[in-house]
Image (cartoon, helix red, strand yellow):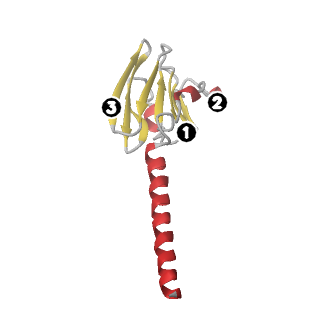
Amino acid sequence: MEERANIVVGVVLGIVLAIALVVVLVVHVFGSGPTGMLRALVHDGDGKTHEISLLEDSTTTITSSLGTNVIVVQDGAVFVSESDCEKHYCVLQGKLSAPGGQIICLPHKLWIEVVTDPSQASAMNEDAVIGVTKDFDAVSQ
């Protein structure tokens, strides 16, 4: 009898743990709803903000009065794949996949940030622009 009770308790605990794991995975992959999904906010030199989901791969060309950047989302990360700026430092900055960092193209006054809620949009982090010279056109944190 005691052995049977231990088996039942073990099965129930296993089911509870499996359900908890599924819930954690769903929240991690899909966020906590529309405001919990990761998005890239691309702020261009003309003052427009373009919102791109990180849930599916895509390529977006952003053209402003200052120039053109090609923004790619691949495997949940965003990066600049092409730019018509002189030094292409924005292309070399790598990928963003979580809130906190920025990709900045100074000649185009374009910057990218990752957020879970568009109302969390911030300003270009000018403190990150340290030691700017004429040979330096982009920064990343």
Which residue type does callout 1 highlight?
Pro
Q: Residue 52 location in percent, x, y? A: 41, 30
* Label 2 packing within 10 angstroms: few (<14), some (14-19), many (20+): few
Query: Which corner quadrant of the image does residue 30 belong to?
Result: top left
Which residue has dot 3 on it?
A: 59
For mark 2, what is the residue?
A: 131
Which corner quadrant of the image does residue 74 belong to?
A: top left
In this view of the protein, which residue sits in the foreground, 24 or 53? Answer: 24
Residue drawn at the location 44% of the way across and 26% of the way down = 51
Mark pair 1, 3: CA separation: 20 Å
Q: Position of residue 65 (x, y in %)?
A: 42, 11
Give the residue displayed 55% in from the left and 32% down from the top.
Answer: 139
Q: Position of residue 81 (x, y in %)?
A: 37, 34
**Residue mark closest to the camera, 1 vs 3:** 1
For badge 2, the amino acid type reads: Gly
| Alpha carbons under labels 2 and 3: distance apart | 32 Å
